[in-house]
Image: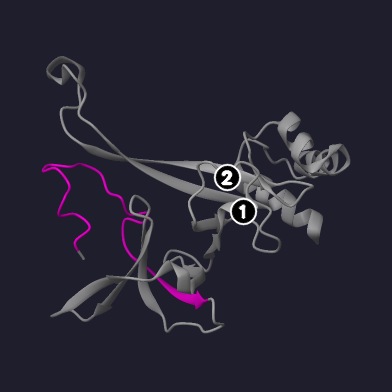
Amino acid sequence: MGRTETLPPGVKGSPRLFKENLKGNVYFTNGGVSETYHINLDVYMREVIIKKGHEKMDFEFGLNLNEVSSIVFKESQSDDSLMYVKLSPSVFEDITDEADFLYRTLTPINNVLIQNTVCELLEPEKGAYSTGRDYHEFKSYDIFYLKGQNDLYQKFSFTKSKLKKILGATKGDRIIEILNSMNLSIKNPDDLARALNELEN
């Protein structure tokens, strides 16, 4: 696919979101749904990678992001699904650093809590003979966003004060009550997602 031809040699780490491709279905902007593919996300180049073929001959290709609205992955270790939705920069309060890409929704009912995985290619450290990394390396990290009262996403730092600021005091207090009643932690994204989903039920 030509995505790695310009990379320096000996790069460590991976730009791909999943260690192994996951089975999933692509939902297109025209309303169509793909057959089940083995899919991965290249979070460095911001591409959707499809693997096709069989044991003796297979190949990969990238999808045109303009045609993708969402992807639902099936986790092989469980019955759970992972849903990624395509969002444009216009739905974020601060659009300066948001790419038009796919975001994991931790609350599929209303997409109120989403996760963006960012990947950087780090340069070798100077003086690495004594300090460590003397090679290029892909490093990924997650940024979480919460949809506010204005229906725009804001970066979320998993504190009670930030929760109330984004959702409003009344809704924020209700979420905190749910977290406490279910013995969940606001610092845990999955716990917060459970509380947000509970509020909708």
Can you tell which mark lies on residue 200? none
Relative side of 152 to 61, left or right: right
Q: Is residue 99 one of those drawn in magenta?
A: no
Which x, y percent locates residue 158? Answer: 64, 35
In what quadrant of the picture does the C terminus appear?
Answer: bottom right
Q: Is residue 4 one of those drawn in magenta?
A: yes
Can you tell which mark lies on residue 95? 2
Which x, y percent locates residue 135? Answer: 16, 33
Which x, y percent locates residue 133? Answer: 20, 27
Question: Residue at point 77% right, 48% down?
Answer: 150
Q: Secondary structure at mark 2?
A: loop
Q: Which residues are magenta?
A: 2-28
Residue 185's image quarter?
Answer: top right
Give the prevailing secondary structure in the magenta stretch: loop
Relative side of 118 to 128, left or right: right
Depth order, front residue of 197/164: 164
Relative side of 15 to 55, left or right: right
Q: CA distance from mark 1 to mark 2?
A: 7 Å
Q: Amino acid at mark 1?
A: Ser
Q: Amino acid at mark 2?
A: Ile
Contact between marks 1 and 2 (CB within 8 A): the answer is yes
Near mark 2 (Cα within 10 A), the count class, few <14, some 14-19 or many ≥20, is few
Question: Residue at point 57% right, 45% down?
Answer: 95
In what quadrant of the picture does the N terminus appear?
Answer: bottom left
Q: Secondary structure at mark 1?
A: helix
Sequence-first disc among 1 and 2: 1
**Position of 20 relative to 28 (above/below):** above
Relative side of 39 to 177, left or right: left
**Position of 75 relative to 153 (above/below):** below
**Position of 114 relative to 181 (above/below):** below
Residue 35's image quarter?
Answer: bottom left
Can you tell which mark lies on residue 90? 1
